[in-house]
Structures are given as structure tokens and as C-alpha cells.
Amino acid sequence: MQSLNTLRKQLSITLLVLMTVMLSGCLHKIITVPVKVAYKTTKYTVKGTVAVAEAVIPGDSSSESNADKDK
């Protein structure tokens, strides 16, 4: 009877550790996927904003400054 209780405790602890390891992988995916999506969305939004700002704001551009330096 005593060994049966010991076996149940060991089995319970083993299953608990196994489930914890398996769920940590799911938790990693749940956290990293939205972070990657937010990063990519922000990156492209910033690139688009910079492109629009460069097109709209008149003034010194890199091609004009390079042409002036060659003269």
C-alpha cells in the first residue's frame, strides 16, 4: 500500500513536469508571434512615413548634394 502511494506521487510529479515543459513551448509561441507582427508592422509604417516625408519636404537631397560636391 505504501509503495502504491509513492508510485502515484512520483507519477504525478513526472506528469506535472512534463506538462509544464510542453506548455512552455505554447507560451513561447503565444508571446513571440504577436511581437513579431507588431515589429514588422511598425517597421513598414516607419519606412512609409520616411518615404512620404522625403517626397513632400523640398530641399536638400543626397543626389543634389553629391552633384554640388563634384563641381
Image (tube, rainbow, N blue to C red):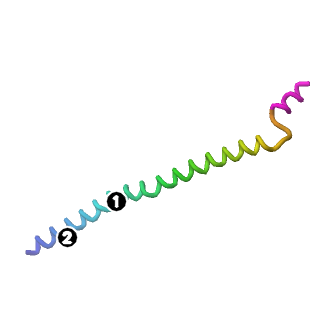
**How packed is label 2: few (under 14 Cα within 10 Å), some, or many (20 or more)?**
few
Callout count? 2
Mark 1: few/some/many CA within 10 Å (<14, 14-19, 20+): few
Residue tagged by mark 2?
A: 9
In front: label 2 or label 1? 1
**Which residue appears at 42% of the width and 54% of the height?**
29
The extreme right residue here reads 71
Number of the label disc, if any, that sits on residue 34: none
Residue 61 position within the rendered picture, expressed as x and y whole percent measured from the top left: 82, 36
- Compared to residue 63, the image places residue 47 above or below, namely below
Q: Position of residue 54 (x, y in %)?
A: 76, 42
Label 2 sits on a secondary structure element that is: helix
SS assignment for the magenta stretch, majority: helix
Kindly identify the residue that appears in the image at 11 percent across and 75 percent down: 2
Is 40 magenta? The answer is no
In front of the other: 41 or 19: 41
The image quarter containing residue 47 is top right
Q: What's drawn in magenta, residue-wise? A: 63-71
Q: Quadrant of residue 64?
A: top right
Q: Which residue is mark 1?
A: 23
Helix, strand or loop at label 1? It is helix
Horizontal arrangement in the rendering, residue 54 relative to residue 64 (left or right)? left
- Sequence-wise first label, 2 or 1: 2
Under mark 1, the amino acid is Leu
Q: The C terminus lies in which quarter of the figure?
A: top right
Q: Nearer the viewer, residue 55 or 20?
A: 55
- Splitting the image into 4 quarters, where does residue 23 fall? bottom left
